[in-house]
Amino acid sequence: MSKINQAQTNEDCKPSLSVIVPSLNEANRLPLLLADLDRWPAPIERWVIDAESSDDTAKIAHLAGAQPRRFPEANRGAQLQHGVSHAKGNWLLFLHADSRLPAQWPQIIEDVIAEPSAKLSAWFFDFRVQADGLNMRLLELAVALRSHWLQRPYGDQGLLINKNLYEQIGGYAPLPLMEDLDFVERLGCQARLKSLGLPLYTNGRRWQKLGLLTQTWRNAQLRRRWRCGESATHLAKDYFR
């Protein structure tokens, strides 16, 4: 085979999609997400950037066929950066480890990335909570309004973005908290954020533990403190305690 044909073959084999999942002690939930990702019909990279979990998160990722990478600290922004540095796909999909994808996700995302103009935008999922109750449905509605009207989808809604656009924006900052808000605010100045029209189900454990109003108020206060200049490192200690 000629060098030209070999280069073309290598390009054809290049994964179109690289999935990047930061993790910390998600051994119970990560396998479900990785099973969802197995529905993708083409070559795919699944990078699990694990912050030295004390459980079997990295081992499970490896056994499931993902590409686990150890990271020395729990810093979601830096973990995402690290994942991108390994990613070879020309599209990036960022997901939280406790997320679940709907069965039809491959077809919708295939259709999006096949459209040439799609690379000019970033794409998010519709927020859904895996918990019953009217208060959770109201939370989902509030998030939908924020995402569509204010262009502020957060990390638990996932993010699909062309790698060139990601690099143009400057990528995720190495922040342990607020990395998603920081990125979409910079992104929104240069591109439109659009809904995929697909739900992404997130674990409701934080809202169930503290209560919806308490957790919502707590999140709002953390965002306020961050905008007032308080360091993300300090805020992360309060959030994850």
Image (spheres, rainbow, N blue to C red):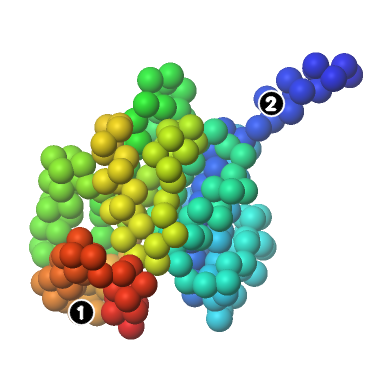
Residue 42 circle label: none
Q: Nearer the viewer, residue 159 or 227?
A: 227
Where 28 sits versus 11, above or below? below
Question: Does 41 sit left or right of 107 as displayed?
Answer: right
Which quadrant of the rendered structure holds the N terminus?
top right
| SS under mark 1 | helix
Question: How many discs mark residues in the rendered view?
Answer: 2
Q: Are marks 1 and 2 in contact (CB under 8 Å)?
A: no
The image position of residue 21, as x and y in percent, is 49, 56
Does the rendering let one see residue 32? no
Question: Does 100 sit left or right of 188 as displayed?
Answer: right
Q: Nearer the viewer, residue 218 or 178?
A: 178
The image position of residue 187, as x and y in percent, is 32, 40
Residue 11 circle label: 2
Where 120 sits versus 59, above or below? above
Q: Nearer the viewer, residue 241 or 233?
A: 233
Q: Nearer the viewer, mark 1 or mark 2?
A: 2
| SS under mark 2 | helix
Q: Amino acid at mark 1?
A: Leu
The image position of residue 185, as x and y in percent, is 26, 46
Query: Residue at label 1?
Result: 210
Where 84 sits versus 89, above or below? below
Q: Amino acid at mark 2?
A: Glu
Disc 2 crowd, CA 10 A, few/some/many (<14, 14-19, 20+):
few
